[in-house]
Image (cartoon, rainbow, N blue to C red):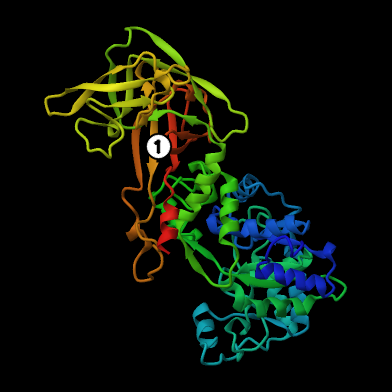
Amino acid sequence: MSTEEKSLNFLEQIIEEDLKNGLSKNKLRFRFPPEPNGYLHVGHASAICLNFGLGIDYQAPVNLRFDDTNPAKEEQEYVDAIKKDIEWLGYKWDTECYASDYFQQLYDWAVEFIKKGKAYVDSQSSEEMAKQKGTPTQVGTDSPYRNRSVEENLDLLERMKNGEFPNGTHILRAKIDMSHNNMLMRDPIMYRILHSHHHRTGNDWCIYPMYDWAHGESDYLEQISHSFCTLEFLPHRELYDWFLDQVYDETKVRPMQREFARRNLSHTVVSKRKLLQLVEEKHVTGWDDPRMSTISGMRRRGYPPMAIRNFAKTIGIAKRTNLIDVSLLEFCVREELNKTTPRVMAVLNPVKLVITNYPEGQEEWLEAENNPEEAVMTYRKVPFSKELYIEREDFQEEANKKFFRLTLGTEVRLKNAYIIKGESVVKDADGNITEIHCTYDTDSRSGSGTEASQRKVKGTIHWVSINHAIPAEVRIYDRLFSHESPDGNKEIDFKEFINPNSLEVITGYVEPSLLSAKNLDQFQFQRLGYFCVDKDSSAEKLVFNKTVGLRDTWAKVESKE
């Protein structure tokens, strides 16, 4: 990477410094290490973009390694979902790895630890261990089992592995220092007994390595040069290095752990435990509910992968945790969709419009542009007839001078069609408008080149021909949480902030070209926002999710700041 091309973040500066100090560029290797105990969320997306982005910038391999050390919470479903998310974001991993690939090597090393007096089997209860470990201001005390003989420790560890003991009866601990000022160094747990079926190793193992033991050694076995993780792992770095000290061979690359800050997103939660709670308690329809902060939820909602990558690039890498307004993510989504989505017409709050002087039974197929952002403009045909649907908000019987849509006695243009003039209304017994009657200027068809077609009117509104309209279920989404930091107050259950109006389901009408739309196809409903086809959609029933509105709310947030 050339420092002239762009300013470097502090992680890139670390890499550059290591290269200057003699690390060979072909020794660079990064990794993304998810736990397969849930679906990935927007926070993981930033970490994915960081690690795979470094791989691209430095032309270095990036491993995908599943930290599958807790079979009680892990499933193959999550492994498959994680791989799908990374591929959807547009990244390719070099090697697919699992911590379980190294279970035998980790166990063999643990045996060596015992032989060298660096590990022992502890038989205290978790409550006894907690007391014995001390506090940040009070040193711990040695376990009564700390000085077991090598022979006894080896025997107990093997019997633990063979499944002779129930969960919780014994653990293997590293023998470091019970008076260490970093409590993580006070004889940390390396293995615990867990009688649970593993999605890859089945019932081969009855003990499983702890994260701190498995992670750094996995990095070492894979020859990862830089192991980047979030800031909460900073206190773990000392233990990461201590474990490596015991196995490190100077002829190999020694992994380096460095930490960056989480970028939390407003109006969301990104704890997998809390996301699972939302799913299990049916506050949402599943991990891929479009209101969820999961990558699969964002995909289903219609967020393009490049928008998420641009968002990660925009917020960058920092040393301090902060809250990013979700409006910035929506801004990135809107920017990307504006370039790529076809424009179509849909009416979501319909009222009937009758063109009284349009010939009965006549229809026309008018030309409409697909996307004005296209380098080479393409067009489609839309049907036009005597009776149309327009948005109810696009008409007022009486309006002030700032209302530029349809009123009685004024003119507007129907998009891609004719200029019309409001003449009268029909109301029901309660005074609600059921029909708007208007007349059209027969010579004013858009693109016809006539003098009337070039006449300027103040407003343009969209429409759908009633005879050709396709009914569609449209799901309108709002923030899942009403509070910008729903899990920021430990005294209040985050679910208290669930927005009861986060989903509104309506029936709208769309132009017939959308009959052939497929799952995840994206569109701009003109003047309404960006929408995508949901997986629940079928030939018999179209279903659309609102992705994001047309209005740039982020600009307002930015201007306030």
Q: Is residue 264 above or below residue 523?
A: below
Tell me the quarter of the picture where residue 214 sits. bottom right
Please indicate whether residue 515 sits to the left or right of residue 468 in the image: right
The residue at 64%/64% (across/down) is 206
The residue at 61%/89% (across/down) is 180
Image quadrant occupied by the N terminus: bottom right
Given the image, on which type of amino acid does mark 1 rest? Leu
Please indicate whether residue 166 sits to the left or right of residue 60 in the image: left
Name the outermost residue toward the left. 429
Q: Is residue 44 above or below residue 402?
A: below
Looking at the image, can residue 160 be seen? Answer: no
Residue 337: x, y in percent? Answer: 53, 41
Give the structural element (helix, strand or loop) at label 1. loop
Tell me the quarter of the picture where residue 429 sits. top left
Looking at the image, can residue 441 be seen? Answer: yes
Along the line of sight, which residue is nearer the eye, 378 or 198?
Answer: 378
The residue at 56%/39% (across/down) is 339
Residue 220: x, y in percent? Answer: 77, 68
Residue wearing tag 1: 528
Image quadrant occupied by the C terminus: bottom left
**Quick one: label 1, few (<14), some, or many (20+) residues within 10 Å?**
some
Q: Is residue 402 above or below residue 514?
A: below
Tell me the quarter of the picture where residue 396 sits. top left
Residue 343: x, y in percent? Answer: 49, 31
Please indicate whether residue 507 sits to the left or right of residue 49 in the image: left
